[in-house]
Image (tube, helix red, strand yellow):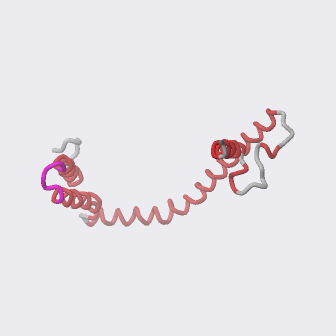
């Protein structure tokens, strides 16, 4: 029986790993590190112990490669576009509510990359003023 309420190879190895970490401050430091690395390796490779679990690992890998991985780039691109759109929207709202007629004060498209954003412009001006103060 392990401290974590489950039995099996994973929990036994985890118990040994916890004991190994506790023994880390003992005089034989290099031996303890070697034992920790060995146990960590066994924790990672133990699902391949039986034929059925080995097949399940292959099935999971195939699922990730054919279903999960192809879905990630579009989702990440969607999140990126949403974040950019929200930022531009907030900049437009700030520009509108300020009553200003100078749009370049909020987002200067002639600047390179993100340096045209009003907050970056303000931060760069603060840095410039501090660097050039005498």
Q: Position of residue 46 (x, y in %)?
A: 25, 60
Residue at image position (41%, 64%) is: 61
Q: Is residue 9 above or below residue 4?
A: below
Residue at image position (18%, 59%) is: 30
Q: Quadrant of residue 112?
A: bottom right
Q: Nearer the viewer, residue 81 or 33?
A: 33
Q: Point out the image quarter for the N terminus.
A: top left
Residue farthest toward the front in the current orientation of the protein: 134
Q: Is residue 27 magenta?
A: yes
Residue at image position (33%, 66%) is: 55
Residue farthest toward the right in the current orientation of the protein: 101
Q: Position of residue 126 (x, y in %)?
A: 66, 41
Residue at image position (82%, 44%) is: 103
Q: Position of residue 101 (x, y in %)?
A: 87, 39
The span picked out in magenta is 24-30
Q: Point out the image quarter for the C terminus.
A: top right
Q: Is residue 77 left or right of residue 68?
A: right
Q: Position of residue 25 (x, y in %)?
A: 17, 48
Q: Quadrant of residue 92?
A: top right
Q: Quadrant of residue 93?
A: top right
Q: Is residue 26 above or below residue 126?
A: below
Q: Nearer the viewer, residue 12 or 49?
A: 12
Residue farthest toward the left in the current orientation of the protein: 27
Q: Is residue 133 magenta?
A: no
Number of on-image labels: 0
């Amino acid at each position: 029986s392990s401290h974590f309420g489950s039995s099996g190879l994973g929990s036994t190895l985890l118990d040994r790993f916890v004991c190994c970490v506790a023994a880390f401050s003992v005089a034989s430091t290099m031996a303890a590190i070697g034992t920790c690395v060995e146990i960590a390796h066994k924790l990672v490779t133990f699902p391949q112990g039986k034929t059925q679990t080995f097949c399940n690992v292959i099935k999971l890998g195939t699922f990730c490669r054919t279903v999960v991985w192809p879905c990630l780039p579009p989702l990440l691109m969607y999140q990126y576009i949403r974040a950019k759109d929200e930022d531009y929207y907030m900049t437009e709202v700030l520009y509108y509510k300020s009553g200003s007629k100078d749009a370049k004060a909020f987002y200067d498209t002639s600047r390179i990359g993100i340096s045209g954003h009003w907050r970056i412009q303000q931060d760069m001006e603060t840095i410039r003023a501090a660097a050039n103060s005498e």
